[in-house]
Image (cartoon, helix red, strand yellow):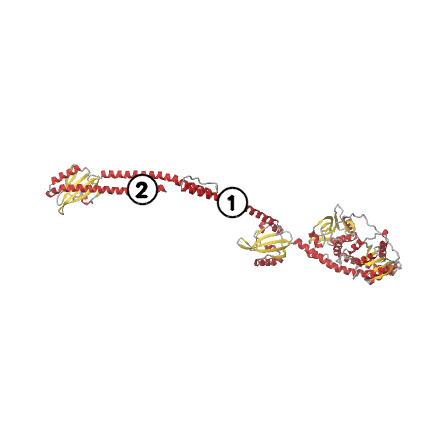
């Protein structure tokens, strides 16, 4: 820039200086010409007046010889001739001729090329006056050679001066560039490198002036910026790591969440976690932009749309329980959906959570079923208890009437028929009591493999069209149970399976053992732990969901009227429940059914065989105290006891029984005690009796027992239990076992 300024200054100097020098030179020439002309005029005045032509020529020749720069000299007298003096010659001319007209037409003090000699001349016209009278003109042409040479010299000098100035300017610019521009460029380069990330770069300037101070300030600023940048980079790195960690935690939570999480914008899926793909069974490309409402079953779709509307209108999360979601392969599942309004980018959206509650709903159904069974069981147990008491009275009197009757007589046969009908009715009440968890069983450790083989042998001979496949565990599957009752469970399940396969099929029975978690046992009111299983699977017609919810209800049957009592599966449910076990069912229409029975695993050793006692009518002596709140039971029991040799005392309540025992304790040999009575029940009565006499034999009698109370009393030392209704022979056998334990199984159920 400085160099450019100098060049412009030199140019301007040349541009203005040369014309000024030229003008000065012309003024000088004009002054010289005027002086010469004044001399010529002064010399020629007298000759003009005398009109001495020869003298004029001579005088002009003398002037030309003395002034070599004069190219021509013309004198013109008014009204007379004109003379032209050139170098070495003269002639008389007529200025009116075209060849010389230029002398008069050409302005004074002009530089033109002379037509006479072809040279550049300074033409000057000067009038000759005498006493204000014009006598003529003198025209002088002064050569421009010397002036042009001088002007050229001036030009060259000026150019030399300009060149010198230019050279000086270049040198000066180089100096200033080195002294000023170079440090500034150094600063500029350092700034650009720092801008590009080279934070360690510093400006190196040692000029000893303000530029060095500027560089020092720049370096200090760069140092501060470098430290700040290092802090910022460290902070950015820290924040980046935090962001990555946050994103990783977010992704970890999202990908491992138990719920499906997704974002709905305009009703379409915009973002989701892998659980949604697992729940729906759809791939990524199918879910992208899908309308989620279309995944809800038609029956529940309006409820889902209502959920979305309420969520959009509320700032709080809105939940809708129990919706069914379709899947492309498997059937629909039950889900809970929670939605909350959010913003996704700049648009309103809904953040949704979907939880698969199919298993929980199944457990709820099982819990509801268990509670329903419990209520129905209580009702059924009460009915069975009262019905058993009626049967006990009838059976007792029938057995009394049979005494003394000869077999084959008409009366005996009639009584035998009545007893058979009572046995059938007793089987019905036994099933009701089994369902109601009111039966009392002889609990012993049994290997379920043995029980299964026995039941299959019994069933297999009656259903040849059904193939029975056994898949039994090699290890013993031991459970504390009543073998007869578990056999009844299996037979009922086998019969149910055969009825589901009217054209034949395959019945598979498996055994095993596994740990049951709390979430599986809790709906049944059972503790978690180790259980042994029997699985009964058929290839029959299967059941729909509605049927599965009712199959364990008493008197529910899918058979035609008269085709079944509807107590088979109900008794299965009750027997297993009374054993502290459970039953589960899985079924689909056209794909068969699978019933899984589970009993708590026992650590006891299995017994090899049952001890069976030969039947016979026991004859005894002594007094028996009968405690029962039912008059018919007291009366028929008294009659049967007296038939086998015992005296009888009767009490209609526990309080009366305790009082009678206290009064006649010395002669009472045994107490026949009802379990369920108003006021003081059987358990409290037993404890009061044993408090008075720890050794008094007590035989419990009931058609319905409360859960665990019979077992508790037997554990406390009660001598035995007899199930109502009973006849004389059964009563005599039980009394014999209680009073002669060395001959029977005293204390067993």
Q: Nearer the viewer, residue 242 or 228?
A: 228
Q: Position of residue 529 (x, y in %)?
A: 72, 50
> Residue 409: which numbered mark, if any?
none
- Image-quadrant location for residue 73: top left
Residue denoted by label 1? 231
Question: Is residue 591 visible to the viewer in this orientation of the structure?
Answer: no
Q: Which is more foreground, mark 1 or mark 2?
A: 1
Up-down relation of residue 216 to residue 435 (above or below): above
Q: Is residue 176 left or right of residue 78?
A: right
Q: Is residue 637 left or right of residue 435?
A: right
Which structural element holds mark 1?
helix
- Image-quadrant location for residue 338: bottom right
Q: Position of residue 435 (x, y in %)?
A: 75, 57
Image quarter of the N terminus: top left
> Residue 11: which numbered mark, if any?
2
Q: Is residue 134 left or right of residue 529?
A: left
Q: Nearer the viewer, residue 86 or 445?
A: 445
Which structural element holds mark 2?
helix
Q: Nearer the viewer, residue 79 or 666?
A: 666
Image quarter of the C terminus: bottom right
């Amino acid at each position: 820039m400085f160099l450019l300024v100098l060049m412009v200054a030199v140019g301007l100097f040349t541009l203005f200086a040369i014309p000024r020098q030229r003008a000065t030179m012309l003024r000088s020439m004009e002054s010289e010409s005027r002086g010469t002309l004044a001399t010529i005029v002064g010399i020629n005045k007298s000759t003009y007046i005398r009109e001495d032509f020869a003298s004029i020529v001579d005088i002009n020749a003398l002037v030309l010889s003395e002034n070599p720069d004069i190219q021509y000299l013309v004198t013109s007298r008014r009204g007379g001739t004109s003379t032209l003096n050139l170098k070495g010659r003269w002639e008389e001319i007529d200025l009116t001729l075209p060849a010389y007209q230029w002398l008069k037409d050409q302005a004074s003090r002009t530089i033109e090329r002379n037509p006479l000699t072809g040279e550049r001349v300074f033409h000057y016209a000067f009038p000759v006056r005498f006493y204000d009278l014009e006598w003529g003109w003198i025209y002088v042409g002064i050569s421009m050679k010397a002036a042009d040479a001088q002007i050229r010299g001036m030009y060259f000098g000026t150019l030399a001066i300009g060149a010198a100035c230019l050279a000086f300017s270049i040198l000066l610019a180089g100096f200033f560039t080195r002294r000023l521009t170079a440090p500034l460029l150094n600063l500029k380069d350092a700034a650009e490198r720092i801008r590009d990330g080279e934070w360690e770069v510093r400006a190196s300037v040692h000029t000893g002036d303000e530029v060095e101070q500027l560089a020092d300030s720049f370096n200090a600023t760069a140092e501060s910026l470098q430290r700040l940048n290092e802090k910022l980079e460290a902070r950015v790195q820290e924040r980046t790591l935090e962001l990555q960690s946050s994103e990783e935690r977010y992704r970890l939570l999202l990908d491992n969440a138990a719920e499906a999480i997704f974002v709905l914008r305009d009703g379409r899926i915009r973002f989701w976690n892998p659980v949604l793909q697992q729940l729906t069974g759809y791939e990524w490309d199918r879910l992208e932009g899908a309308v989620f409402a279309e995944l809800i079953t038609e029956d529940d779709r309006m409820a889902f749309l209502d959920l979305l509307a309420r969520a959009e209108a509320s700032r709080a999360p809105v939940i809708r329980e129990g919706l069914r979601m379709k899947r492309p392969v498997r059937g629909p599942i039950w889900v809970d959906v929670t939605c909350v309004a959010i913003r996704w980018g700049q648009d309103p959206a809904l953040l949704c959570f979907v939880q698969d509650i199919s298993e929980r709903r199944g457990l709820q159904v099982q819990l509801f079923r268990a509670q329903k069974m419990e209520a129905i069981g209580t009702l059924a147990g009460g009915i069975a208890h009262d019905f058993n008491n009626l049967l006990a009275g009838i059976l007792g009197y029938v057995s009394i009437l049979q005494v003394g009757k000869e077999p084959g007589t008409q009366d005996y046969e009639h009584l035998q028929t009545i007893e058979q009908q009572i046995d059938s009715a007793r089987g019905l009440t036994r099933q009701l009591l089994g369902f109601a968890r009111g039966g009392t069983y002889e609990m012993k450790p049994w290997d379920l493999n043995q029980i299964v083989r026995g039941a299959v042998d019994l069933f297999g001979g009656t259903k040849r069209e059904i193939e029975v496949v056994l898949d039994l565990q090699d290890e013993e599957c031991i459970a504390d149970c009543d073998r007869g009752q578990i056999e009844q469970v299996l037979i009922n399940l086998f019969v149910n399976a055969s009825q589901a396969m009217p054209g034949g099929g395959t019945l598979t029975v498996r055994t095993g053992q596994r740990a049951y978690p709390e979430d599986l046992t809790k709906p049944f009111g059972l503790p978690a732990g180790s259980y042994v299983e029997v699985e009964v699977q058929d290839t029959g017609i299967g059941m729909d969901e509605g049927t599965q919810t009712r199959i364990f209800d008493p008197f529910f049957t899918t058979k035609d009227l008269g085709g079944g009592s509807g107590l088979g599966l109900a008794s299965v449910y009750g027997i297993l429940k009374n054993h502290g076990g459970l039953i589960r069912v899985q079924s689909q229409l056209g794909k068969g059914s699978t019933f899984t029975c589970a009993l708590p695993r026992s650590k006891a050793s299995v017994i090899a065989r049952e001890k069976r006692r030969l039947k016979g009518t026991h004859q005894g002596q002594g007094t028996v105290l009968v405690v029962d709140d039912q008059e018919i039971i007291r009366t028929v029991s008294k009659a049967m006891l007296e038939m086998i040799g015992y005296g009888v005392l009767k009490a209609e309540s526990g309080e009366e029984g305790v009082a009678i025992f206290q009064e006649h304790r010395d002669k009472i040999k045994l107490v026949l005690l009802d379990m369920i009575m108003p006021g003081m029940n059987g358990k409290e009565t037993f404890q009061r009796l044993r408090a008075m006499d720890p050794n008094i034999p007590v035989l419990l009698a009931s058609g319905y027992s409360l859960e665990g109370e019979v077992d508790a009393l037997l554990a406390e030392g009660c001598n035995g239990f007899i199930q109502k209704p009973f006849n004389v022979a059964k009563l005599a056998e039980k009394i014999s076992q209680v009073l002669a334990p060395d001959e029977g199984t005293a204390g067993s159920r």
